Image: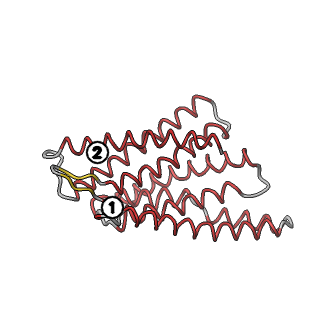
């Protein structure tokens, strides 16, 4: 039951972000080609490749519901094969065979390539010492922190699209951005703490270590989100 609730929560968030991102792309680039569906599918494919390595293959058992919410719920709802199929059929019915073929090629090849790149990134992060730097008195899970930073950068770019391209009032834009960033900072930091607990560290005995990593992750992610915002404005 806990996994079902986690998937439901993750799926609702993923569906909302997909709608806002694809809507923003269509308002920006027009509807002559299914840009929105293509981009969310490629981005989602990269994320599932990266996070499969970080969340599943590292086998952090305590975060089972956490993984289900992200991989099955959020990314499952963020990406959409059915919409890709429908838009391709519409292009064929309208006689745009070239665009239909291009959409199929870019979607299939692009998503496969994005998953492959995501897996390579995830594996390379954990290649050195299992993604952990050991030092006297504690550890630094650098691989998960870098993975969090990569996702934070994408959040910055997506937030830029939402702020500039989607027809929402300023109050809704600000609220949506604050909720999205705040939720990500909290969940990404929580996962690091769960990882440390899985490694044998207790909150009572290693409070300073856990708080330090939580705060450090938050500061790094805020900086990277800001860089993503700046990058998004240049796109």
The 10 Å Cα crowd at callout 1, few under 14, some 14 to 19, many 20 or more, is some
Identify which residue is drawn at 53% across, 37% down: 176
**First in sequence: mark 1 vs mark 2:** 1
Residue 132 drawn at (x, y percent): 28, 58
Is 188 situated left or right of 202 in this image? right
Identify which residue is drawn at 27% across, 50% down: 193
| Residue that extends furthest to the left in the rendered view of this protein | 205
Identify which residue is drawn at 57% across, 45% down: 157
Q: Which mark is residue 64?
A: 1
Q: Which mark is residue 213?
A: 2
Vertically, is 163 above or below 102? above
**Mark 2: secondary structure:** helix
Vertically, is 184 above or below 60? above
Is 196 situated left or right of 118 in this image? left
Q: How is the image coloured?
A: secondary structure
Residue 110 drawn at (x, y percent): 62, 66
Residue 197 drawn at (x, y percent): 22, 54
Quadrant where the image shows the N terminus? bottom left
Which of label 1 and label 2 is nearer to you? 2
Is 30 situated left or right of 7 in this image? right
Vertically, is 152 above or below 126? above
**Mark 1: secondary structure:** helix
């Amino acid at each position: 039951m806990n996994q079902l609730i986690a998937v439901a929560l993750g799926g609702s968030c993923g569906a909302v972000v997909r709608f806002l991102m694809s809507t923003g792309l269509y308002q920006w680039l027009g509807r002559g080609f299914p840009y929105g569906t293509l981009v969310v599918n490629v981005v989602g494919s990269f994320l599932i490749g990266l996070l499969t390595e970080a969340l599943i293959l590292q086998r952090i058992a305590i975060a089972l519901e956490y993984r289900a919410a992200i991989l099955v719920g959020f990314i499952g709802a963020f990406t959409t094969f059915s919409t890709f199929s429908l838009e391709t059929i519409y292009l064929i019915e309208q006689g745009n065979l070239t665009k239909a073929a291009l959409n199929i090629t870019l979607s299939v090849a692009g998503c496969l390539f994005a998953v492959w790149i995501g897996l390579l990134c995830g594996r390379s992060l954990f290649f050195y010492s299992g993604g952990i730097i050991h030092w006297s008195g504690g550890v630094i899970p650098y691989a998960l922190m870098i993975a969090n930073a990569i996702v934070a950068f994408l959040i910055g770019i997506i937030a830029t699209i939402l702020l500039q391209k989607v027809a929402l009032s300023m109050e809704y834009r600000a609220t949506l951005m604050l909720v999205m960033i705040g939720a990500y900072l909290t969940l990404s930091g929580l996962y690091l703490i769960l990882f440390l607990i899985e490694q044998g560290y207790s909150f009572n005995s290693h409070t300073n270590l856990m708080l330090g990593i939580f705060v450090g992750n938050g500061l790094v992610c805020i900086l990277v989100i800001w860089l993503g915002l700046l990058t998004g404005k240049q796109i």
